[in-house]
Amino acid sequence: MQQVLTGLDVLAGEGFQRLQGQRIGLVAHPASVDNRLCHAADMLQNAPRVKLECLFGPEHGWAGHAQDLEPLRSGGTHNRSPRVISLYGDTAASLRPSSDQLEDLDTLVIDLQDIGARYYTFQATMLYCLEAANAVGLRVLVLDRPNPLGGLGIEGPSLRTGYESFVGAHDVATRHGLTIGELARLYQAERKMDNLDLEVVPCRGWARGLWFDQTGLPWVLPSPNMPTLETAVVYPGQCLLEGTNLSEGRGTTRPFELCGAPWLNPEVVARELNQENLPGVAFRPTRFQPTFQKHAGKLCGGVQLHVLDRGAFQPVRTGLAVLAQMRRLSGENFRWRSEPYEFVADPPAIDLLFGSDRERRGLEAGRSWRELAEAWVSEEQGFAKRRRSFLLY
């Protein structure tokens, strides 16, 4: 097994020299730990000649205790110091640090474990922090971490103008195959942040073909419903169900691996999906009862995704196929999510997740999921070319 060092490990190995004599703000969450499970906030508080002024928490909070879409207020402290600032409140403006919150800092350190999907919001928080720092000329140090899914796979549609949101802050493929440090470099260039003093501390020992369980690093759930690497593997496709009234498995011990609804027959769903012959995955009929969120307390019929060959598995196409089949089998019970989603009421959630209304309208018109996915090929190839100059590994 390859022993990988994260950007935090590298920074600590240098004795935090890049930050000495500076006032620091840290953007972090539970997975912001070194290879011994020491949290970045504690390490910076004990680092020589480094003053940690404030701790910024993204969605779910810096402690990772809040569920998705649950706003958090700023306030409180971490280990008696420093102040804690929420970057996920009850308005869209709360997603970005204000100039007042940044004015007493010399460097903003960002250490966030991403999952490798466009709609996993931590990389959007990073983008908004970069833009805020660019506006005031603040130095930003991004501590890189491996992409848990490896850096080779690229899959999914592009993001079209007019469909930007917290789950689609910039046009990258749904499964982008980049580390968070590489995303920072791409964002700086493509968003033309010419006033941004950005430095990325790369990982050591990571190669693009490595999955997280091949790095020797401990897995810490970065958000409440991302408990394992297996969850992360299916997430780039299964998160699409958030845009519907189908359960994506929240409120169970296998979020995103389980999916279904009270009106679905699990044996029929599994049979129809297994007949699609999707690469690297099998569908097992199952029943589950969520304890919170969609269909809480109700017995749901559905399937569990069992990824048998993660190298061949195509999560976004699989997610589209699951959505298409469950929508068809649901009949009049099926609904697209109509409630506001990540501070946006229109376009609807499913369009924000796909990055346009193309897939939703295609399904409504009776087009097959395979036909819809054919349009992705040229977009995936285009993104693969766009990202090349920003790769660090």
Image (spheres, grey):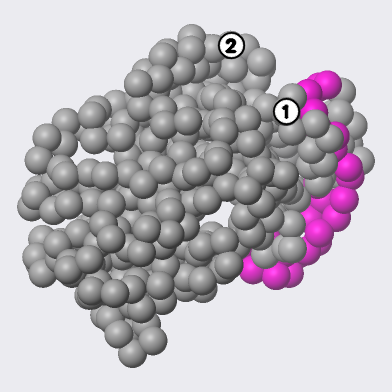
**Left or right: residue 345 compared with residue 286:** left
Residue assigned mark 1: 311
Local packing at callout 1 (Cα closer than 10 Å; few below 14, some 14-19, many 20+) is some
Residue 164 lies in quadrant: top left
**Left or right: residue 252 compared with residue 139:** right
Q: Amino acid at mark 2?
A: Glu
Residue 295 part of the magenta segment? yes
Taking depth in this image into account, of 78 and 286 the one nearest to the observer is 78
Residue 253 percent across, percent down from the top left: 74, 63
Residue 176 percent across, percent down from the top left: 49, 31
Residue at the (28%, 81%) spot, across then down: 82
Residue assigned mark 2: 374
Q: How many marks?
A: 2
Q: Is residue 256 visible?
A: no
Q: Quadrant of the N terminus?
A: top right
**Disc 2, SS:** helix
Residue at the (43%, 59%) spot, across then down: 13
